[in-house]
Image (spheres, helix red, strand yellow):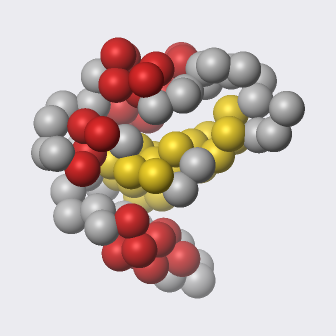
Amino acid sequence: MAKRIVEVFTAGCPLCDETVKLVRELACSNCEVQVYDLREGCATNECREKANQYGINRVPAVVVDGKLAECCSHQQPVSREVLIAAGIGQG
């Protein structure tokens, strides 16, 4: 089975920290979790370019296999149910 790529975009806020914790809690062995702190940026600016590409304009935001999670595209809070529906933790 192919790895599921889960990207979490944050800015170091308490809500962002809770989202990262929830994603890691739900992630299964087939989930590869990558956290990008947009406040700090990355060495190659890759994280900000990815955020632009996915249309992210607020954090926390979760992308699963290249698709922005439903909650994040409709500016709703990240929830356990939405992350599961997006495929996180479903080996």
Q: Depth check: 67 or 19 in front?
A: 67
Give percent across and percent down for residue 82: 34, 25
Q: Looking at the picture, does residue 23 appear above or below residue 49?
A: above
Q: Residue furthest left?
A: 75
| Residue 10 in view | yes
Left or right side of 13 for 17: right
Left or right side of 10 for 5: right
Q: Depth check: 65 or 38 in front?
A: 65
Give percent across and percent down for residue 1: 85, 32
Left or right side of 73 for 52: right
Q: Residue at horizontal 81%, vertical 39%?
A: 2
Q: Residue at horizontal 39%, vertical 50%?
A: 68
Give percent across and percent down for residue 4: 68, 39
Query: What is the count of numbered marks?
Result: 0
State the image quarter where residue 51 is shown. bottom left
Q: Depth check: 27 or 44 in front?
A: 27
Q: Residue at horizontal 30%, vertical 67%?
A: 55
| Residue 35 in view | no
Q: Looking at the picture, does residue 58 appear above or below residue 43?
A: above
Give percent across and percent down for residue 62: 40, 44
State the image quarter where residue 27 is shown. top right
